[in-house]
Image: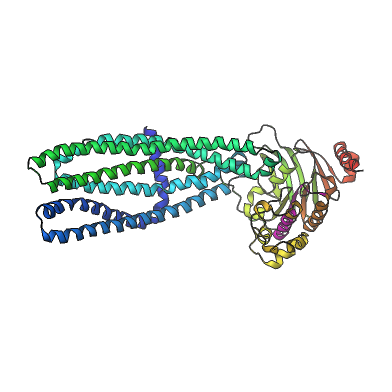
Amino acid sequence: MALLKNDTIRLLRRSLSYFLPYKMLIIASFAALGVVALSTAGAAYLVQPALDEIFIKKDQTALVFLPFLLVAVFLAKGIGLFIQKFLMSYCGTKVLEQLRYELFAKIICLPLDFFGETRVGMLMSRIISDVNLISASLPELIRIIQHSLTMVGLIGLVLYRDAQLAFWACLVFPLAVYPVIYFGKKLRKIGRKYQSELADISSHLQESFNGLRVVKAFASEELEKDKFRIVSKNLARIGIKGKMYNQLSSPIMELIGAIGAGLVIWYGGSQVIAGNRTPGEFFSFMTALIMLYDPFKSISQANNTIQQAMAGAERVFEILDSKDLIEEKGGDIEYTPPFASLAFENVTFFYPGTTDPALKNINLTIKAGERLAFVGQSGAGKTTIAHLVPRFHDCTQGTIRLNNRPLSEYTLASLRSNIGIVSQDPFLFNLSVRDNIAYGQSSTDQALVEQAAIAAYAHDFIKELPHGYETIVGEKGVKLSGGQKQRLTIARAIMKNPSLLILDEATSALDTESERIVQKALENLMEGRTSIVIAHRLSTVLSADRIIVMQNGKIISEGTNDQLLQTCPFYSKLYKLQFEGQK
C-alpha cells in the first residue's frame, strides 16, 4: 500500500513537472479558483437573508437588492470557472504537445535493435493514447483543489451557521473517504490493463493494414476479423469494468451524502420546530451542505481520472526514464569526404537474443574508388555487414575503421549523411515525388532534383504522373510500380551525393525489364564512388573489382569473377546454378 502511494506521488510529480513552464497561467487559474470558491459559499450564504428578509419579513429593499447580488455572485462564479477551465485546457494541450514530442524524439533515436523487439502499434499507443491521459492529470488535480477550496468555504459557512448541525453533517465524512481510495486503486489497475489492450489493438491494426496484400492473397479476411474481434472484445470488457467502478462511486457518494442530509434534517428540523432557529438559517445551512457534498463527489471522480492518468504515466515514463533504453550516440568528430578506406578488423556480431554469431571474425579492407561485391546464400551475413557500416548496429567484437578512425568516433549525423543506401525494399514517404527525392537535404531546388531524377532514369515517368514532381506517391509509394519506386530511391541517393555507397540487393525484387533500367541508374549512381554491392543475382556483380564470397557469417574467398570460378568451388556452384539454368 505504501509502495503504491509512493509510486503514485512519484508519477504525479513527474507528470506535473511538465506544467512548470506555465506556472504563471496556473497561478492565474488558482486565483480564478478562489473566486469560484468564494462565489459558491456566497451563494449559499445569500439563502438565509433571501428567505428571512424577503419571504418572512417581506422587506422591499431586500427584494430589490438581493436578486441583483445573487446574479453578481453567479456571474463572478461563471467568469472564474471559464478562466480556470480555459487556462487548464490550454496548459494541458501544451503539455500534451511537449510530451508527445519528447516521447517521439526518444523513440526515433533508439537503436534499431529496440524496434526489432518492440511492436510498432504499442509505441503508437503510448505516443497517442497514454500521453493523452497524462495531460489530464493537472486539470484534474486543479479540479480537486478547486473543490477542496469550495469545501473549505462551505465548511466555514456551515460552522458559522450552526456548529452542532455541522457535527451531525460531518459524521458521515469518514465513510466518504473509503470509496475514494478503493475506487482509485481499482481504476489504476484497470487503466493499466486498458492501455495495454489498446496497444494490442494498435499493433493488430498496424500489422493487418501493412500486410493487407498477404491477407487478401491468402483470403484470410475472416481470420483477421476473428483476431480483431478477440482483442476488441478484451478491450471492451476491461473498459466496461472501468466504467462500472467509475460510475459506481457516484451513487455511493450520493448515498453517503443522503445519510448526512437526513441527520441534518432530523436534528435541524427539530430545532426550527422548537423555535431555536429561523427557517432561513436552516435552509442556508442545508444549501451549503448540499453544495458541500457535490464537490466531495467531484473530488472522487477527479481522483478516478488521476489514477487512470497515472496508469498512462507509468507506460510513458517507462520509456522516457528507462536507463536500459539508451539513445544512439556517436563520437565528436565530423566525418568529411573524401573517402579513403574502410577496414573491418576481427569483426564479430551477435544479434540481440541470439547465441550464434551473424558474423565471425571478419577482416576486410575496402579502398577508395573500389567496387566491392558480397555474394552468398541467404543468412550468410551480407546484409549484416551493410548494416554495421552506418552503425545501424555496432559490432560485438572487433573494430570497423573509416579513414583509419573507428566508426564510433564520428558523429552519427556526419557518418550517415555521407553514406548512400539503396535496399531491395524501396521506402517512400507519403509526400510528393520532389520531396521524396530531396528527403533529408537542406535544398529542394527543382533543378537539382530533376538532375538527380534524370541520372536515375526517373525523369521521363515522373513527367507523365498527374502532377509531375508534385504528385503525392501514397503511403510507401503505393501509387508507383516497383521499378519506379526503386528509381526514385536511387535519385534520392544521387541527390545525397554520398562518398560511400551501399547497394543491398537493389534489383532482386524487379522483373527483367525493370532490372535493366534500374541497373543503368545504379551505374550512374556508382560512377566515381566507392561502392559495396550486395547481390543475390551474380549478373549484377560480374564487373566488380572484388567479389567477397560469404558462408555462415564468414568470408570464405575473394577475388574477381574469373579468379573465383577457378579457386572457389562454392562460388562456382552458385555461378552454375544461376547461369547454366538460364541457357
Residue span colored magenta: 486-511
Where is residue 8? Give x, y as percent: 39, 39
Q: Is residue 144 above or below residue 66?
A: above
Quadrant in the rendering for residue 32: bottom left
**Residue 167 seen in the figure:** no
Asked whether, in this view, residue 176 is left or right of residue 236, the answer is left
**Magenta stretch contains residue 183:** no
Say which residue appears at 77% left-offset and 62% top-offset: 460
Where is residue 233? Give x, y as percent: 52, 36
Q: Is residue 309 above or below residue 30?
A: above
Q: Is residue 378 above or below residue 501?
A: above
Asked whether, in this view, residue 139 is left or right of residue 239, the answer is left
Which quarter of the rendering shows the C terminus? top right
Say which residue appears at 26% left-offset and 52% top-offset: 37
Where is residue 275? Give x, y as percent: 7, 43
Where is residue 428? Give x, y as percent: 67, 53
Quadrant in the rendering for residue 164: top left
Q: From the viewer's side, name the closer residue of 55 and 500.
A: 55
Q: From the viewer's side, name the closer residue of 281 and 462.
A: 281
Q: How is the image coloured?
A: rainbow
Asked whether, in this view, residue 120 is left or right of residue 159, the answer is right
| Number of residue marks | 0
Which quarter of the rendering shows the N terminus? top left
**Magenta stretch contains residue 495:** yes
Residue placed furthest toward the right? 583
**Residue 136 seen in the figure:** yes
Quadrant in the rendering for residue 395: top right
